[in-house]
Image (cartoon, rainbow, N blue to C red):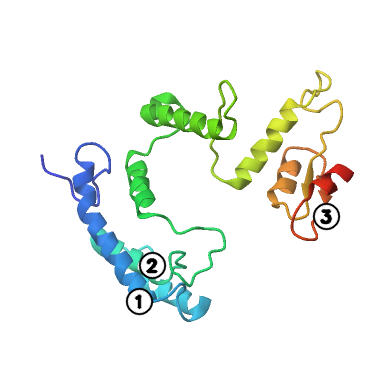
Amino acid sequence: MSVPPAGTALAGGTNGPRALRPLLDTVLDALTTGAEDRAGPLPPGGPDTVARAVRDACHPLLPEHGTGPHAALRTLVHTLAAGAADPADPHCAAHLHCPPLALATAADLAASALNPSMDSWDQAPAASALETLAGHALAALVYPRAVRPDALITTGGTESNQLALLLAREAAPHGSATDPHRPTRPLQIICGANAHHSIHRSAWLLGLPAPLTLPTPDGILTPDTVHTC
């Protein structure tokens, strides 16, 4: 069976990998040449130079006629790679993002091609089973003596903090039936001055009192400080 043109071919199914292969060659080549042009952890010239290079490469942004999938991919990926902050460079001190392993990036390709939606089992049968197994395994590392430990995987620290405060709110003794979400005593959140800003933001979003913020002069919330509080 013939493979549809790369611009219209889907990534999944039995023909998807064959449609992806030539596109991946183009992307990998562009990643290489872009990194060679950058030649360091950051693109030279600063914000104005990078912005000008992006504008020149992508003009017009919405053309009347496209250049074709390979030319468009080559231009876009090369421009992004040449103007990227590369956390894999030995001279890069990453702010938050780490250098991804090639193995993880390859696995992410598979996840993108299959595009499982974790909303319900019928949208991600095997991925749902894998997520359950991963949650049990991670929870068992933290609570090895628990009978059936479980975990919930979130997208990152901000969502984790919000979920933690939500669970604390729901676990607190609730008030009257007219206001079931309000605890009988206000739930008091305690955190250090060095805590992530998502703690205060999540408390506001969830209608909780502002967190009691304890001093952390050395960047550490000590047990003595918590005990005194």
First in sequence: mark 1 vs mark 3 = 1
Residue 189 visible somewhere in the drawing: yes
Task: In the rendered view, tell whether residue 208 sits above or below residue 34.
Answer: above
- Amino acid on which disc 1 is placed: Asp
Q: Find residue 109 and report its horizontal and vertical position in percent.
A: 34, 47
Q: Residue furthest bottom?
A: 45
Identify the disc placed on residue 37: 1
Q: Which class describes the residues within 10 Å of circle 3: few (<14), some (14-19), or many (20+)?
A: some
Q: Quick one: 63 or 127, which is closer to the camera?
A: 127
Q: Which residue is mark 2?
A: 81
Q: Are marks 1 and 3 in contact (CB under 8 Å)?
A: no
Q: Are marks 2 and 1 in contact (CB under 8 Å)?
A: yes
Q: Find residue 99 and report its horizontal and vertical position in percent.
A: 45, 59
Residue 67 visible somewhere in the drawing: no
Q: Find residue 10 and report its horizontal and vertical position in percent.
A: 26, 43
Q: Which residue is mark 3?
A: 215
Identify the disc placed on residue 106: none
- Amino acid on which disc 3 is placed: Pro
Q: Quick one: 193 or 2, which is closer to the camera?
A: 193
